[in-house]
Amino acid sequence: MSIKTGDLAPDFELVNQFGEKVSLSSFRGKKNVVLVFFPFAFTGTCTGELCALRDDQSAFQNESIELLAISCDAMFTQKVFAEKEGYNFPLLSDFWPHGAVAMKYGVFNEDR
């Protein structure tokens, strides 16, 4: 399944790198949300992409925009990754069921 422009984004609830629950619906009517899906922490491409977001974070996160990065890594991996790279935005764990949220958004490649 994938979503199209104008569709209501599927809701989800995942834990961030601190073990706190974060739901997409908690932002509805309050903030615009930028969702960034990345396969795994500590990989070259993913680290580079998230570092670029970190370095230009004001364009992606402010009083009216929330940046949420989602991967299939466990919460503990997300925590170490965020600390090592200095990410101060939420990294959400789509660990179990493996990639369930990414599948809702049509960005999970089951063949890989």
Image (cartoon, rainbow, N blue to C red):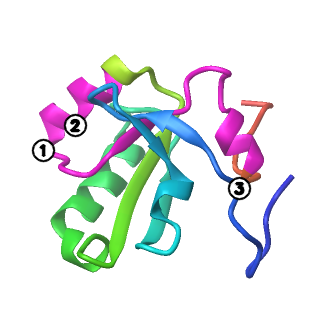
Task: Give the residue drawn at x 73%, y 69%.
Answer: 8
Q: Give yes or no for contact between labels 1 and 2 (Cβ–Cβ under 8 Å).
A: yes
Q: Any magenta on residue 93? A: yes
The span shown in magenta is: 77-104
Q: CA distance from mark 1 to mark 3?
A: 29 Å
Looking at the image, tell me whether mark 2 or mark 3 is earlier in sequence order.
3
Label 1 residue SS: loop
Residue receiving disc 3: 10
Looking at the image, tell me whether mark 1 or mark 3 is earlier in sequence order.
3
Task: Give the residue drawn at x 53%, y 54%.
Answer: 24
The furthest residue to the right: 1
Q: Mark 1 packing: few (<14 Cα in 10 Å), some, or many (20+)?
A: few
Residue type at tag 1 = Gly
The tag on residue 44 is none
Q: Would you place residue 18 above or below residue 47 in this image? A: above
Q: Any magenta on residue 53? A: no
Residue 7 percent location from the top left of the image: 77, 73
The tag on residue 86 is 1
Residue type at tag 2 = Ala
